[in-house]
Image (cartoon, rainbow, N blue to C red):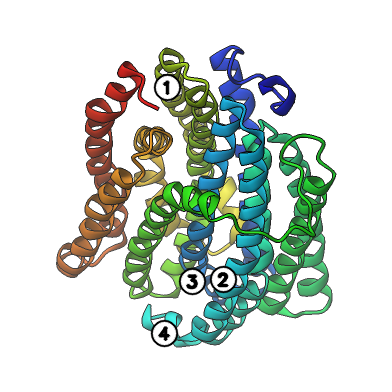
C-alpha cells in the first residue's frame, strides 16, 4: 500500500537522510519560485517605475503573508492526515480527506477574497502606509485578493501531492508559471506602462494558472489521492481532523504575520526609503526561510507516514536529521548572500541609500537565520504527534507579545532600523527555548512509549 501510494519515494522504509533531502529540495525550489513571483514584481517596479512603486508593493508583503499563512496552515492539516492514513493503509479515509480539503479550499478562498477586497485600504491606512504610496499599494493589494481563491486551491492541491511524496510536479508547475509571470510583468509594465497595476495583474494571472494545472494533476492522478471535481463533499470527521491539525498551524502562521505587521508599522514610520530597503532585503532573506520551511514540510510528511506505520524509533531520527540538515543548508544560503550582497541588492534597485539600509537587515537578521529550523521542525513534529497548540501558544508569547512590546517600548527610545532588525533573532531565541523544552518533555516521551 505504502509503495503504491508514495510512488515518488518510499519514505517509510527508505534511507532517512536521502529521503529528507530529496523531499525538501523540490519544496524549497517551489517556494523559491513563489517568492520569485513577488521578486519579479519588485524588481520590475524598482527598475522601471521607481522607489515609490517598489515601496508600494513592499508595503503589502506582510498583509498578503497574513492571509497566505492562514490557508497554508490549514493545508498542513490535510497533508498530515493524508500522509498518516497512507502509513496506516486507510484508503477510504484518504479519499474523504482529499475531497473535503478541495471543497473547503473553494469556499475558504472565496471568503478570503471578499474580506480582502472590502478592507484592503483600511488595513494599509491602519498600518501607517505613507500617503504617497497608499493608492498604488491599495490597487496592488485588491488585485492580488481577486486571485486569492486560486492561491488557496493551489496550496491545498500541492499539499495533497506532497502527502504522497510528490514534490516534483508542483515544482514543474511553478517553474512554468514563474516564467509566465516574468513575461507578463515585462509586457504590462514596460510595454503598456501599467506600473504597479500591471505587476499585480501578472501575478494574479500566474496564480490562476497554478490552480488550474494542479487541479488537473489531481484529477488525472492514478493513486488514492485522485480527485473527482464533481464530488463536492465535506465529511465532518475528515474536516474536524484537518482543522485539529491545521487551525493551530494557521494561527501560528497568522500570529507570525500579525507580529510582522506590527513591525511593518514601525518600519513605515521610518519613511519610503526604509520601506523599499526592507522590501529588497526581505526578498533576499526569504530564501533562508524557505529552506527552513521546506525541511519542516519534509519532517511533517515523512514523520506522519512513519508515525502512522508506528515506526517510533525511526521518527526520532527523522526529527534530529531534519534539524541538522536544514541548519547546514541555511548556513550555505547565508554564506552565498554574504558573498554577493551588493550584487543581489542591485537587482532590486540602483538607489545607494536604499542599498545601504538594506545591508543592515542582511547583516543582522539574515546572518542569524540559521537558528530558525530548530523551532520550525520541532513544531512540525509536535503537530504530527497531535499537540499542534503547543507551537501556537509558544508563538503567541514568544513572538507576537514580545515583538509588540518591543515596538511600543524599545523602538520609541531607539527609533532606528537597527532596533527593528534586532527584534527578530531575539524572538526566535525565545521560541527555540520553548519548542525544544516542549519536544523533550512531550514529543520524545510519546515516541518512546509508542502512543498513536
Inter-mark Cα distance, 1 to 3: 34 Å
Inter-mark Cα distance, 3 to 4: 11 Å
Relative depth, front residue between 161 and 402: 161
Look at the numbered discs 2 and 3 and tell me whether their residues touch, using CB distance below 8 Å: yes
Residue 33 is at least partly visible in this image? no
Q: Nearer the viewer, mark 2 or mark 1?
A: 1
Inter-mark Cα distance, 2 to 1: 35 Å
Q: Residue at x 41, y 43 (%)?
A: 366
Q: Residue at x 29, y 56 (%)?
A: 418
Q: Mark 1 or 3 closer to N-term?
A: 3
| 96, above or below 266, in the image | above
Q: Which mark is residue 59?
A: 3
Determine crowd level at label 3: few under 14, some 14-19, many 20+ residues with C-alpha closer than 10 A.
Answer: many
Inter-mark Cα distance, 2 to 4: 15 Å
Relative depth, front residue between 177 and 91: 91
| 281, above or below 391, in the image | below
**Spot occupied by residue 442 in the image (x, y as percentages of width and height):** 26, 30
Q: Return the residue at label 2.
A: 57
Q: Nearer the viewer, mark 2 or mark 4?
A: 4
Q: Return the residue at label 1.
A: 324
Q: Residue at x 65, y 60 (%)?
A: 103
Q: Which mark is residue 125?
A: 4
Amino acid at each position: 500500500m505504502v509503495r503504491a501510494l508514495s510512488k515518488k519515494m518510499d519514505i517509510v522504509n527508505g534511507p532517512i537522510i536521502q529521503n529528507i533531502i530529496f523531499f525538501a529540495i523540490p519544496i524549497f525550489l517551489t517556494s523559491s519560485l513563489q517568492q520569485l513571483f513577488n521578486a519579479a514584481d519588485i524588481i520590475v517596479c524598482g527598475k522601471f517605475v521607481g522607489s515609490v512603486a517598489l515601496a508600494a508593493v513592499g508595503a503589502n508583503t506582510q498583509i498578503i503573508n497574513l492571509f497566505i499563512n492562514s490557508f497554508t496552515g490549514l493545508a498542513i492539516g490535510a497533508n498530515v492526515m493524508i500522509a498518516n492514513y497512507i502509513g496506516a493503509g486507510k484508503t477510504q479515509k484518504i479519499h474523504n480527506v482529499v475531497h473535503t480539503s478541495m471543497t473547503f479550499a473553494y469556499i475558504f478562498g472565496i471568503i478570503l477574497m471578499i474580506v480582502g477586497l472590502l478592507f484592503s485600504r483600511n488595513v494599509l491606512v491602519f498600518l501607517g502606509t505613507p500617503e504617497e504610496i497608499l493608492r498604488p499599494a491599495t490597487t496592488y493589494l485588491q488585485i492580488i485578493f481577486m486571485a486569492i481563491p486560486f492561491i488557496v486551491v493551489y496550496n491545498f492541491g500541492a499539499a495533497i501531492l506532497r502527502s504522497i511524496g510528490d514534490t516534483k510536479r508542483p515544482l514543474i508547475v511553478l517553474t512554468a508559471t514563474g516564467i509566465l509571470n516574468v513575461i507578463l510583468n515585462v509586457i504590462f509594465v514596460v510595454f503598456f506602462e501599467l506600473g504597479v497595476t500591471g505587476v499585480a495583474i501578472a501575478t494574479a494571472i500566474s496564480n490562476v494558472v497554478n490552480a488550474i494545472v494542479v487541479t488537473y494533476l489531481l484529477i488525472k492522478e492514478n493513486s488514492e489521492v485522485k480527485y473527482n471535481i464533481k464530488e463536492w463533499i465535506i465529511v465532518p470527521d475528515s474536516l474536524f481532523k484537518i482543522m485539529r491539525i491545521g487551525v493551530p498551524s494557521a494561527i501560528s502562521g497568522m500570529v507570525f504575520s500579525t507580529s510582522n505587521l506590527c513591525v511593518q508599522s514601525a518600519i513605515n514610520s521610518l519613511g519610503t526609503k526604509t520601506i523599499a530597503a526592507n522590501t529588497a532585503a526581505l526578498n533576499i532573506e526569504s530564501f533562508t526561510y524557505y529552506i527552513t520551511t521546506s525541511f519542516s514540510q519534509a519532517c511533517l510528511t515523512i514523520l506522519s507516514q512513519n508515525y502512522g506505520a508506528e515506526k517510533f524509533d525511526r521518527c526520532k531520527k527523522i526529527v534530529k536529521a531534519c534539524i541538522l540538515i536544514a541548519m547546514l543548508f541555511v548556513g550555505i544560503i547565508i554564506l552565498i548572500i554574504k558573498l554577493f550582497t551588493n550584487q543581489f541588492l542591485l537587482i532590486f534597485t540602483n538607489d545607494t541609500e536604499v542599498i545601504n539600509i538594506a545591508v543592515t537587515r542582511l547583516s543582522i537578521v539574515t546572518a542569524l537565520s540559521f537558528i530558525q529550523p530548530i523551532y520550525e521542525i520541532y513544531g512540525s513534529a509536535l503537530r504530527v504527534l497531535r499537540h499542534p497548540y503547543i507551537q501556537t501558544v509558544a508563538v503567541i508569547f514568544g513572538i507576537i507579545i514580545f515583538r509588540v512590546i518591543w515596538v511600543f517600548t524599545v523602538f520609541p527610545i531607539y527609533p532606528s532600523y537597527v532596533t527593528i532588525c534586532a527584534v527578530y533573532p531575539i524572538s526566535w531565541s525565545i521560541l527555540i527555548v520553548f519548542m525544544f523544552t516542549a519536544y523533550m518533555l512531550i514529543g520524545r516521551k510519546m515516541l518512546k512509549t509508542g502512543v498513536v
